[in-house]
Amino acid sequence: MSQKTALLTLSVAATAALSANTFITLAGATAAAGALAHAVATTDGEAGDLVPADVLGTSTVTAEAAIATGAALQVGAAGGATPQVAGGICVAYALEDAAVGELLEVLLVQGGNVGA
């Protein structure tokens, strides 16, 4: 279905090229794999652009692996979503199933939890 209900969307100044539907930091960069993310970029952007980014609520993210509804998610290698593994920080929960390359709706998690 890939809808979204963002409760808070902020403008983030990009410090590098950003891709829509990927996890980013408030510093304006794509979040590192397994690391903390603060938001999801909703559009593409180049360094210096103000990019709208969903911070609270639900958003749509590109799946980098097969994902099942309810799965805890972490940032993947390209800034998309992958199932959380040991040591990875949970940044969202899947609200629908998705195959690699598909968009899926996720419930954003602020603060993250490290996988055991």
Image (cartoon, grey):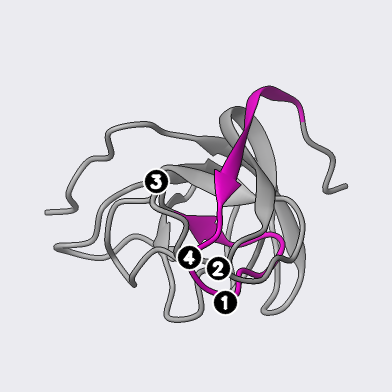
Q: What is the three-letter code of the residue carrying label 2?
A: Gly
Distance between the Cα atoms at labels 2 and 1? 6 Å
Q: Which residue is mark 2?
A: 80
- Residue segment shown in magenta: 5-24
Residue 70 visible? The answer is no
C-alpha distance separating marks 4 and 1: 23 Å
Up the image or down, 55 lies above or below 87; here it is above
Which secondary structure lies at badge 1? loop
Labels 4 and 3 touching (C-beta < 8 A): no
Circles 3 and 2 in contact, beta carbons < 8 Å:
no
| Residue under the point 44% across and 64% down | 29
Q: CA distance from mark 3 to mark 2?
A: 11 Å
Picture layout, residue 62 above or below residue 73: below
Look at the numbered disc 3 and give the secondary structure of its residue: loop
Disc 4 marks which residue? 15
Viewer-nearest of discs 4 and 1: 4
Asked if residue 66 lies left or right of residue 115, the reply is right
Quarter of the image for residue 57 reads: top right
Q: Between disc 2 and disc 4, whose residue precedes?
A: 4
Q: How many marks?
A: 4
The amino acid on which the numbered mark 4 sits, given as a three-letter code, is Thr
Question: What's the residue type where badge 1 is placed?
Answer: Glu
Numbered mark located on residue 64 in the image: 1
Lateral position of residue 7 relative to residue 88, left or right: right
Counting from the top left corner in percent of width and height, residue 78 is at 51, 79
